[in-house]
Amino acid sequence: MMLESRQASANEAWLPTHDELQPSYDFIVVGGGAAGLALAVRLSECESQNVLVLEAGQFPEIVGSYKSLGAGQQVLGMGKSAFTTPAQESLGNRTITYHRGRGVGGSTLINGLTYGRGSRSVYDLWQDMGNDDWDWDSILPLFQKSTSFHPVNVAPYQTYDASAYSTNGPIQLSYPIYVYGSSTAFLEAPSAVNVSTVFDLNLGDNIGAKQEPLVLDKRQQRLSSYDSYYKPARNRTNLAVMQLAQVHKLMLERQNGSLVATGVVFTDSTSGHILNVNASKGVILSAGVFQTPQLLMLSGLGPQETLQEMGISEYLINENTGRNMQDHFYFSIIAHASANDSASETYNRIDLLRAAQQEYAASNSGLLTTPIGPTYGFQQLPSAELQSLGAAQALMNRTRQAHIEYLWENIYYPSAPPTILPQYPPNRDESFISVTAALLSPVSRGNVTLQSNAIQDAPLINVNYLESEIDQKFALKMFYNLRGILSQPVLSRHTTRLDNGEVVPGANVTDGTTVLDYDAGGVVDSRLRVYGAKKLRIVDASIFPVVPDQHTQGQIYMVAEKAASMIKEDHGLS
């Protein structure tokens, strides 16, 4: 067998070309992002199992600057896919653009690095919705297994509870060394809306203000899933990762009356060849919230009307595919700030940026060792306030969680062309900070569908932000609260000019397009198996039935760890 005969050094990754692929693997993972790589590495711990990962993007060494924590403004244009929605009626016909990492490592190559888990009650609700063993007590060991904490600073705002983490997990967590004064000031400012500082947000109570841990190594460099999971395992002879491999659809067969996933069809973009590869034990989709449902529908698994409209053969009708999309929509107030409290001038002036890059390259120090915003406040609204917003019934099972998040950023955020923000296009010689609010418990639901029967055409994404009147009322409250936070003396002293520096009175964390539990509108069962099909699972954020009240990097790694354990158990592997 080719995997057994190749020669590999301890530091050599096997990057197969199309003519080096085996005709069949035990497991094929579609998508080499956070979940896909973590899952593949865990499955390849079983030496008898051959695992293939197919990733449409490239290996991240192509974009070396991705390692810098503060390089997000530079690397966002590289190694990514941009998905733009149609005009959204609920947003006055605006469009929204989503950025997704496209490469081995996925969005962990370009994200804000924040690690969080969310509230115990959200996962207990997953269990109550019919998803056995997804409650907080069941998944906490998986959160712990995937992490290790290595503190660099000892500071009042960089605290953590060691019991919440392990000491040898692949995801290394720490705090940035370089911290802006306005960042620490922001920790106290949410007291204006009764949000106090807390010791650690990852204990199941996601309420309070905190500088959150980041996924970074001891050199203060970004750790993607490529770094944390794949690199230590890259010399395994039973693990193959193929870059520039765009999967078109699943190979499906009827066997003894059952629909079975037998492999995938993909294009090797290097050679242009269209290839088939088989999976004897299973295909796992980890293509993300947008492209996992797209691949299901392109393969004939989805809403009947969509399949018929696109001329796709119907293998399995499930009207839930691509539905239930949930997003933490956000908006910001942007304010003038003193130069020492902002990175915007550095990012916008080539001379300052070059100097910062040289400092980072020479000593791993300076402002590029911190992301644009590691400081957050999570607010739980009391029942009476939910009642006043008309949300008591809609959120009756979501009262014990954070409902609104407040964020601080050291730049003009989100940046936008003058056509979107004509009132104040930023001057490159000015300094800005931003305070942002995100709705963590949206009532509005979006969807993903097809615009053609080709994978090369992006799916149609309808976010439906603010479609619900409840979300509209939340948005007004969030804006009012942001102004209260910005006006707090502890923060306003870091701004300049009138009105607390205010200049300008958003889309990234999506979940739920395949969602657990069929009766609740799902596509997969509690063991992540696609309803009505054998040897087919989904392992990514699209399975979240309810979006957690946190940034979702930590939860995606947890899902991958849980999926690996379940798959090993189902196949008697160890």
Image (spheres, grey):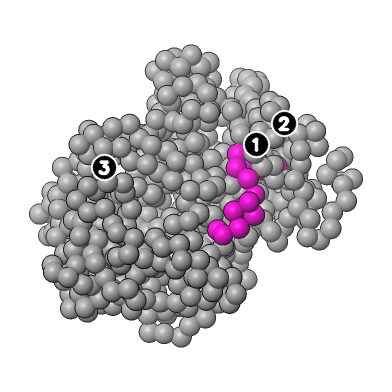
Say what secondary structure mark 3 lies in: loop
What residue is pinned by disc 2? 271
The residue under label 1 is: 245
CB within 8 Å, label 3 to label 1? no
Label 2 neighbour load within 10 Å: few <14, some 14-19, many 20+ = few
Across and down, in percent, residue 447 comes to 36, 34
Tell me the number on the disc at residue 572.
none
Q: Which residues are magenta?
A: 51-66
Q: Nearer the viewer, residue 209 or 72?
A: 72
Picture coordinates of residue 552 (x, y %)? 43, 55
Give the residue drawn at x 18%, y 78%.
489
Between 455 and 240, the residue placed more toward the observer is 455
Cα distance in 3D space between marks 3 and 1: 36 Å
The CA span between labels 1 and 2 is 10 Å
Looking at the image, is mark 1 or mark 2 earlier in the sequence? Answer: 1
The amino acid on which the numbered mark 1 sits, given as a three-letter code, is Ala
Which residue is drawn at the image coordinates 53% and 64% (left, top)? 68
Q: Is residue 94 above or below residue 485?
A: above
Q: What amino acid type is highlighted by mark number 3?
A: Thr
Above or below 361: residue 152: below
Mark 3 or 1: in front is: 3
Badge 2 amino acid: Ser
Query: Which residue was labeled with disc 3?
Result: 419
**Quadrant the N terminus occupies:** top right
Q: Secondary structure at mark 2?
A: loop
Task: Name the N-terminal-most of marks 2 and 3.
Answer: 2
